[in-house]
């Protein structure tokens, strides 16, 4: 009877990645890191009330109006990722390093007259890295003295980036407002390898086994709109407010699966398939941002940002997505995302020292995936001359996420993986 459960599992498991993974996709596309310029990374990304930075205008387009010069910028970095899982006394580790294009951008002054300046900015900004690895195995006794071994290995890779076209206005250095269009696009690869073996009470004879390998490779492109304002009631204080509409994303890619199981040692069941036209669409959450900054003339600043996003506002559509089931799954398993970012910059003539801290809730509720938070420690330094500047920034993100084994005989408790991501970024600034 127990061995037949393994066979039943292998037949029923096919929808699990396509349905369950959409929960992770929705959370990943809602919670962003904004790993753009080295300067914004160095101060925790807390730039929405300051502007004058290409990473900032992806959040608040009013920052476009703060540009005082026409700039060209380019950012390139190194992204390292590691994970560690301990479950039932077994430890599994993973690490990876790759290059990342943080941002490039340009700003142009359209019109400059007494008391009013109009500015256009184009920017590319990487919003998130999808690098992740969740690996664990379990070995336990089941009924009749038999033993059951199961492993689960889930790996994600890719990125979410956004092209921003923004227009900003500076009114007497007191009011700044802006409008923008965001064009997010992504590449995402999801691989799941799940297997199990049922052993007789001698611990050697195999009574049945299964293995389920599924891979999804998808690209997406979307669109959203942004609007924002920055107000300077006094020269030392800046207050920012911005809103981003929900995004609409079109996905296309491939879905492959391979399954095999033996209900008994002599009876093998196999199935495999591929869908090279894996198409669907997604509506992601909007975003509300507020920010505040204290500026001490030419000596530096302190700033703080707050964002709120609700992935439960999102949804999926398409003939290959069971819309009603996905919608219910999203409402039950996801939660509001709160992000806080703080940063400080100190200026020493033409040199700058920076530091910051960021915090984000996970977007998952506590019933299924746990309330694991994402914490970021930031730092950086820079030099800015009349025509040339260079900035260096780094951030270390730490978090943890939970997963469940899928087999019918698997333990009901989840395994938790500790994640660490460190990004080093360098930005070249050219002043026209």
Image (cartoon, rainbow, N blue to C red):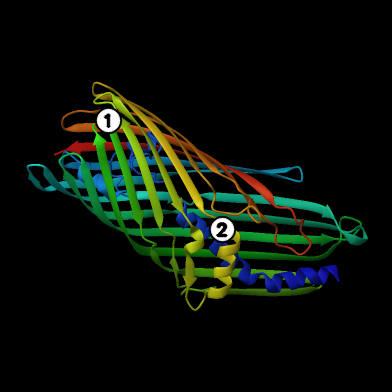
How far apart marks 1 and 2 lie (CA) works out to 39 Å
Q: As drawn, is 156 to the left or to the right of 197?
A: left
Horizontal side of residue 135 vs 324, given as left or right: right
Identify the residue shown where x is 33% and y is 35%: 293
Q: Which quarter of the figure has residue 389?
A: top left
Write down the quadrant of residue 55 in the picture.
Answer: top left
Depth check: give the residue in front, 19 or 206: 19
Which residue is under mark 2?
A: 334
Side of 249 where 348 appears, left or right: left
Picture quarter with the C terminus = top left
- The reply to whether discs 1 and 2 touch (Cβ–Cβ < 8 Å) is no
Is 407 or 63 nearer to us in this picture? 63
**Residue 322 visible in image:** no
**Which is nearer the eye, 424 or 307?**
307
**Regarding mark 1 in the picture, which secondary structure is present there?**
loop
Q: Element type at marker 2?
A: loop
Tell me if mark 1 has few (under 14), some (14-19) or many (20+) residues whose alpha carbon lies within 10 angstroms of its own: few
Mark 1 — residue?
236
Q: In the orientation shown, which residue stands out farthest toward the left? A: 113
Q: Residue at x 29, y 34 (%)?
A: 237
Q: Quadrant of the N terminus?
A: bottom right
């Amino acid at each position: 009877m127990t061995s037949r459960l393994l066979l039943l599992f292998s037949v029923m498991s096919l929808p699990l990645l396509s349905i369950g993974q959409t929960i992770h996709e929705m959370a990943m596309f809602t919670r962003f890191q904004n790993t753009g310029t080295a300067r914004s990374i160095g101060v925790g990304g807390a730039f929405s009330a300051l502007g004058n930075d290409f990473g900032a205008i992806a959040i608040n387009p009013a920052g476009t109006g703060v540009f005082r010069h026409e700039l060209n910028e380019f950012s390139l970095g190194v992204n390292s990722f590691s994970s560690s899982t301990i479950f039932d006394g077994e430890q599994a580790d993973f690490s990876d390093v790759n290059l990342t294009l943080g941002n490039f951008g340009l700003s142009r002054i359209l019109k400059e007259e007494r008391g009013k300046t109009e500015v256009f900015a184009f920017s590319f900004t990487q919003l998130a890295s999808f690098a992740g690895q969740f690996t664990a195995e379990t070995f336990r006794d089941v009924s009749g003295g038999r033993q059951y071994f199961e492993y689960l290995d889930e790996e994600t890779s890719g990125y979410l980036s956004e092209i921003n076209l923004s227009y900003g206005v500076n009114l007497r250095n007191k009011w700044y407002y802006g409008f923008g269009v965001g064009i997010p696009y992504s590449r995402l690869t999801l691989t799941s390898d799940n297997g199990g073996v049922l052993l007789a009470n001698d611990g050697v004879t195999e009574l049945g086994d299964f293995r389920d390998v599924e891979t999804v490779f998808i690209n997406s492109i979307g669109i959203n709109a942004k609007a924002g304002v920055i107000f300077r009631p006094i020269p030392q204080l800046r207050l920012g407010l911005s809103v981003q509409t929900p995004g609409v994303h079109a996905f296309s890619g491939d879905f492959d699966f391979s399954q095999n199981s033996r209900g008994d040692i002599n009876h093998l069941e196999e199935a495999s398939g591929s869908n090279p036209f894996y198409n669907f669409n997604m509506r992601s959450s909007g975003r509300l941002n507020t920010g505040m900054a204290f500026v001490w003339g030419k000596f530096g600043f302190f700033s703080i940002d707050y964002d709120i996003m609700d992935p439960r506002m999102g949804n999926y559509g398409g003939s290959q997505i069971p819309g009603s089931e996905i919608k219910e799954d999203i409402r039950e398993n996801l939660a509001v995302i709160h992000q806080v970012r703080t940063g400080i910059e100190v200026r020493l003539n033409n040199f700058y020292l920076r530091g910051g801290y960021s915090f984000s809730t996970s977007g998952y509720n506590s019933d299924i995936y746990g309330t694991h938070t994402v914490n970021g420690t930031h730092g950086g330094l820079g030099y800015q001359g009349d025509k040339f500047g260079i900035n260096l920034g780094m951030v270390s993100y730490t978090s943890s996420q939970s997963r469940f084994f899928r087999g019918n005989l698997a333990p009901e408790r989840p395994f938790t993986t500790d994640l660490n991501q460190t990004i080093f970024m360098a930005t070249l600034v050219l002043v026209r």
